Amino acid sequence: MTDSQRVLVYGASGHTGKFVVDEFLRRGLQPLVAGRSLSRLEQSEGLDRRAASIDDGPGLRALLRDVAVVVNCAGPFLDTALPLATAAVETGTHYLDVTAEQPAVQQLYRELDAAARSAGTVVVPAMAFYGGLADLLLTAVLGPGKSAAEAEIAVGLDRWWPTEGTRVTGARNTATRLVIRDGALVPLSAPAATGTWDFPEPIGAQSTVELPFSEAVTVNRHLEVGTLRSWLNTAPLDDLRDPGTPAPQAFDESGRSAQRFAVEVAVGSGPQTRRATATGRDIYATTAPIVVEATAWLLDSRHRGSGALAPGEAFAAADFLKAIPDADFEAVWH
Ligand SMILES: NC(=O)c1ccc[n+]([C@@H]2O[C@H](COP(=O)([O-])OP(=O)(O)OC[C@H]3O[C@@H](n4cnc5c(N)ncnc54)[C@H](OP(=O)(O)O)[C@@H]3O)[C@@H](O)[C@H]2O)c1
């Protein structure tokens, strides 16, 4: 591991990357900003800029010299995660990303776990709204036992104004989605199950469809869950499917959109059900305090273990969720 405390954001020119850079600055940390092209980083005035394309291994290793933690915000992660995370392991740099893509997470677990252990570094994909948040909530609810016969995760959005990156990533990721059944990852059966979920206001009661993101892979990595069902309400999928739906617009000076979300986790049934709920505003903006908090924990060695890890495996979930510094965000569980 390098002794440096430098942090580098790759994909800093993107919508999410900008929120991440701003969150570092808000916390008094000056990140290096990077991407495949220096010209795309011109808005990051006053910050050191570095560029290397994702197919340039030596260039990526040079990019990470003297860097303690790299945060990858450049998606599709099916294109960027493995090359950048490989360079990170080779240079003794911790790696975080914000992928919602299941195959990108599987690839990192498969290809880099042993090498990261040898290097004494961590590779933690999906440290984001989709993936990481549900993984942390479920880990917090399960507690030290870490096991459940059945668990459900439900994401409710009042709207979905997708970024270009979301659209490109959706088109790039054509793999059949995986769910957990009998403790193993198996293909989601078609047609996907539908249901209803009663989210907290302002989202309320919604029609849902079974639609897992990267949390199915991260949960299967470190928790003993027999059956995991991940639901998304159907209304925002209509926004996503409509090519006319605009990209997110700033609703106030924070740059956040007006989008509201709720993520719920339920374990067990009836009066014995244990629940966790996280609510907040703007799924892209909320990803920034999640991945920046993870960076802070890595910088002062509050993480656990080394290797390619799930969010709730690398970080003490309940303490981590309480620490997320976001005025709009609230997580509760019992
Ligand atoms: N899990 C979650 O909850 C969550 C939350 C937010 C975002 N995401 C994911 O994060 C990714 C970025 O989203 P966004 O909203 O920030 O999109 P965006 O505004 O379109 O930004 C995309 C970023 O990725 C970079 N990029 C794309 N392909 C690249 C490649 N082959 N090599 C190097 N850089 C590349 C772009 O660089 P240029 O400027 O050079 O084009 C840009 O910096 C998407 O995959 C999205 O799904 C996930």
Image (spheres, rainbow, N blue to C red):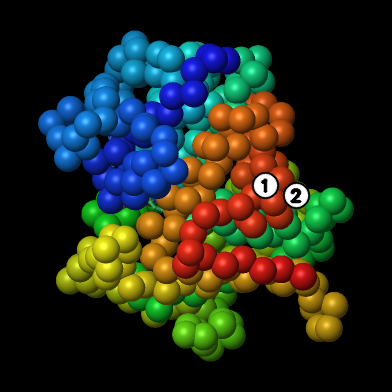
Residue 190 coordinates in the image, percent (x, y) = 52, 67
Horizontal side of residue 255 vs 103, given as left or right: left
Q: Amino acid at mark 1?
A: Gly
Residue 13 figure quarter? top left
Quarter holding ligand 1 = top left
Q: Nearer the viewer, residue 231 or 205?
A: 205
Question: Which residue is the site of mark 2?
Answer: 223
Residue 38 figure quarter? top left
Provide the secondary structure element on which disc 1 rests.
Answer: helix
> Could you tell me how far apart the alpha carbons at marks 1 and 2 are, in whole angstroms?
9 Å
Give the crowd class for mark 2: few <14, some 14-19, many >=20 residues within 10 Å. Answer: many
Can residue 188 be seen from the camera position used here? yes
Can residue 240 be seen from the camera position used here? no
Horizontal side of residue 150 vs 72, given as left or right: right
Q: Given this view, does label 1 or label 2 mark the residue nearer the observer?
A: 1
Are dots 1 and 2 in contact, CB under 8 Å? yes
Q: Residue at 34% of width from left, 46% of height from top?
A: 22
Residue 20 coordinates in the image, percent (x, y) = 38, 45
